[in-house]
Amino acid sequence: MKFLIVFVALFAVALAAPTSEILRSESDVGPESFKYDWETSDGQSAQASGQLNNVGSEHESLAVQGSYKFVGDDGVTYEVTYIADENGFQPQGAHLPVAPEA
């Protein structure tokens, strides 16, 4: 009986969950680079492009730049732009804290 109650509760939650449609989805993936761009009807979107640097050397690395956007539980749209390369992940956004000067 407990299993049935839990199952019905989870089923009701799944039905109540909002759904979104894919409005746009594009990608281009090659051996030394990639690019993607997508957007959904619920306000989410992301885009990025990456390039393989120093191909064939022992210092080969991937450099990526992009952004993503989503609507938070508070109804505010948050956007993050970033660079990810040999220096790590470097996000920027109006809602993100800024580190003090070193």
Image (cartoon, helix red, strand yellow):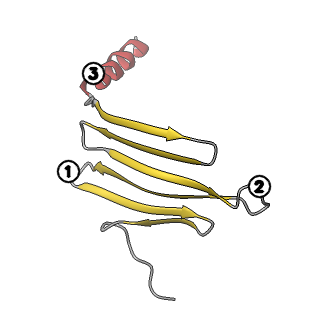
- In this rendering, is residue 4 above or below 14? above
> Which residue type carries mark 1?
Gly
- Marks 2 and 1 in Cβ contact (< 8 Å): no
Q: CA distance from mark 2 to mark 1?
A: 46 Å
Residue 55 image point, x, y percent:
71, 56
Residue under the image location 22 percent in, 52 percent down: 74
Name the front one of labels 2 and 1. Answer: 2
The residue that disc 2 covers is 56
Q: Earlier in the sequence, mark 2 or mark 1?
A: 2
Residue under the image location 48 percent in, 52 percent down: 49
Q: Is 33 positioned to the left or the right of 45 in the image?
A: right
Q: Earlier in the sequence, mark 3 or mark 1?
A: 3
The residue that disc 1 covers is 75
Name the front one of labels 3 and 2. Answer: 2
Residue under the image location 20 percent in, 50 percent down: 75
Residue 34 image point, x, y percent:
53, 46
Q: Identify the mark at residue 23; answer none if there is no mark.
A: none
Q: CA distance from mark 3 to mark 2?
A: 50 Å
Q: CA distance from mark 3 to mark 1?
A: 21 Å
Q: How many marks?
A: 3
Residue at the right extreme? Answer: 58
Depth order, front residue of 44/18 = 44
